[in-house]
Amino acid sequence: MVKNKNNKKGVMYSTNPNFEFEYENKEMKTLPNNEQHLKVCIDKHRAGKIAVIIKDFVGKTEDLKALGKLLKTKCGVGGSTKNGEIIIQGDVRGKVMEILEKEEYNYKRVGG
């Protein structure tokens, strides 16, 4: 594990000379596609634009970004990957769910 001052957990400073910082382990093992339980939501963003949001991905950031890129490419739209969520521009929830099904992800449609 890399000991980086930005990964310190809980304590900012200690006067105890024998104190050892507890470090956060940000790297999570990515679950296989068939063990993921994703939520596919529709949301209105700025200026009333509609976006599809995929939540509850369990795994590494690189794998989340790869899934986001796959969805954006196959839907032919833009989007982003932030805070553990994939945001796909436009009302393409049906297409996103088809792609997730082909890739053998477990997903649930949430909201209208």
Image (cartoon, rainbow, N blue to C red):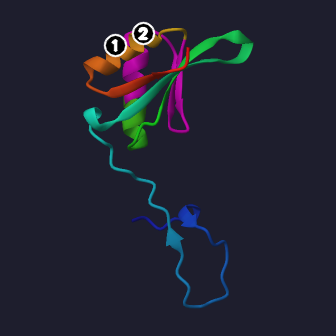
Q: Residues within 10 Å of mark 1 (few under 14, many from 20)?
A: few
User: Which residue is drawn at the image coordinates 46% and 28% (left, top)?
Assistant: 39
Percent x, y of residue 72: 43, 17
Q: Amino acid at mark 1?
A: Glu
Give the residue at the far right of this rendering: 47
Secondary structure under badge 1? helix
Quarter holding residue 36: top left
Q: Quadrant of the N terminus?
A: bottom left
User: Which residue is drawn at the image coordinates 62% and 89% (left, top)?
Assistant: 16
User: Which residue is drawn at the image coordinates 55% and 19% (left, top)?
Assistant: 111
The part of the chain drawn in magenta is 67-89
20 in the magenta segment: no
User: Which residue is drawn at the image coordinates 42% and 32% (left, top)?
Assistant: 65
Secondary structure under badge 2? helix
Q: Quadrant of the C terminus?
A: top right
Determine the CA span between mark 2 and mark 1: 6 Å
Q: Amino acid at mark 2?
A: Gly
77 in the magenta segment: yes
Image-based side of 58 in relation to 11, left or right: left
**Do the CB atoms of the residues marked 2 and 1 lie less than 8 Å apart?**
yes
User: Which residue position is annotated with label 1?
Assistant: 98
Percent x, y of residue 48: 70, 11
Nearer the observer, 92 or 72: 92
> Vertically, is 23 above or below 76?
below
Percent x, y of residue 93: 46, 13
Q: Residues within 10 Å of mark 2 (few under 14, many from 20)?
A: few
Quarter holding residue 64: top left
